[in-house]
Image (cartoon, helix red, strand yellow):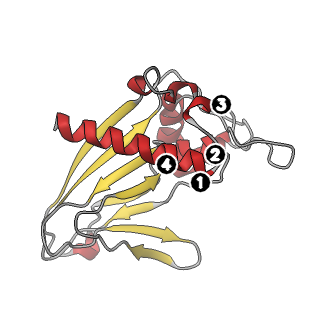
Amino acid sequence: MEEYQKEMKRLTERILELMLGSQGLTFEDVNWLKPKTGCDKAQEILHLNSYPVCPKPERAMGMGPHTDSSLVTLLYPGSCTPLTPGLQVHEDGIGWVAVQPVPGAIMVNIGDLMQILTNGRFKSVRHRVVVSKTRHRFSVGYFYGPPSDVKISPLLIDDDHPPLYGPITWKEYLHLKSMHFDDALQVIKNGNAR
């Protein structure tokens, strides 16, 4: 598991580099992400998920609707073949859409802290997990975020794009999310938190 977590961290930091780069930013723009100094302080959570067979899947939920509080979440949907869809994302105007897993692929979810960091240019995705009537599914989630004491605030601001969110630590955000759940981003919008 330790080796898996190290590889997930390397992959996540490469994905972050590409995402930030697509917006004209580098790790140097995010102090706690600077190589050799900051990345070692990032927080990581590895979550092993088990979704047993459910005789009445319409009456049960593997994981209720939510957004991830992290910067980025990597999800490995398991290796049992054929892969059984379980993850669903919510698309405005359409509703819940099943995400078809691809063998050997890792899914990337944008988290709430990335939405704050990019001033809303990258949006966190509301998702849920459903259970199957015929297959026991396993997945591994890897959540990556800043050190607990680092304030996250919008970086992509200018005269045309004022900051949408006030600065907040992951720990503070998790506390807000425990009280306001999926409305937590709205609570801190324009610095209204606390």
Of helix, strand and loop, which one carries label 2?
A: loop
**The residue tagged with tag 3: helix, strand or loop?**
loop
Amino acid tagged 1: Phe
User: Of label 4 and label 1, which has the lower sequence position?
Assistant: 4
* Tag 1 near tag 3, CB within 8 Å: no
Q: Are marks 3 and 2 in contact (CB under 8 Å)?
A: no
Residues at marks 4 and 1 touching, judged by CB atoms closer than 8 Å: no
> Which residue is drawn at the image coordinates 59% and 29% (left, top)?
28
Q: Is residue 87 above or below residue 5?
A: below
* Residue corresponding to mark 1: 122
Q: Residues within 10 Å of mark 2 (few under 14, many from 20)?
A: many
Give x and y (percent) for residue 48: 21, 47
Q: Name the quadrant containing residue 98.
A: bottom left
Q: Where is mark 4, residue-wise? A: 111
Question: Which picture quadrant has residue 113?
Answer: top right
Picture residue at 29% right of the left edge, 62% below the top: 105
Alpha-carbon distance for marks 3 and 4?
16 Å
Count neighbours of disc 4 (C-alpha within 10 A) and say few if under 14, some if 14 to 19, many if 20 or more.
Answer: many
Question: Which circle, 4 or 1, is nearer the viewer?
Answer: 1
Q: Is residue 187 above or below residue 93?
A: above
Residue 86 visible, this angle: yes
- First in sequence: mark 1 or mark 3? 1
Picture disc at residue 167: 3
In the displayed structure, 124 sits above or below 173; it is below
Foreground: disc 4 or disc 2: 2
The residue under label 2 is: 118
Q: Are marks 1 and 2 in contact (CB under 8 Å)?
A: yes
| Observer able to see residue 180 | no
Q: CA distance from mark 4 to mark 1?
A: 9 Å
Foreground residue among 179 and 49: 49
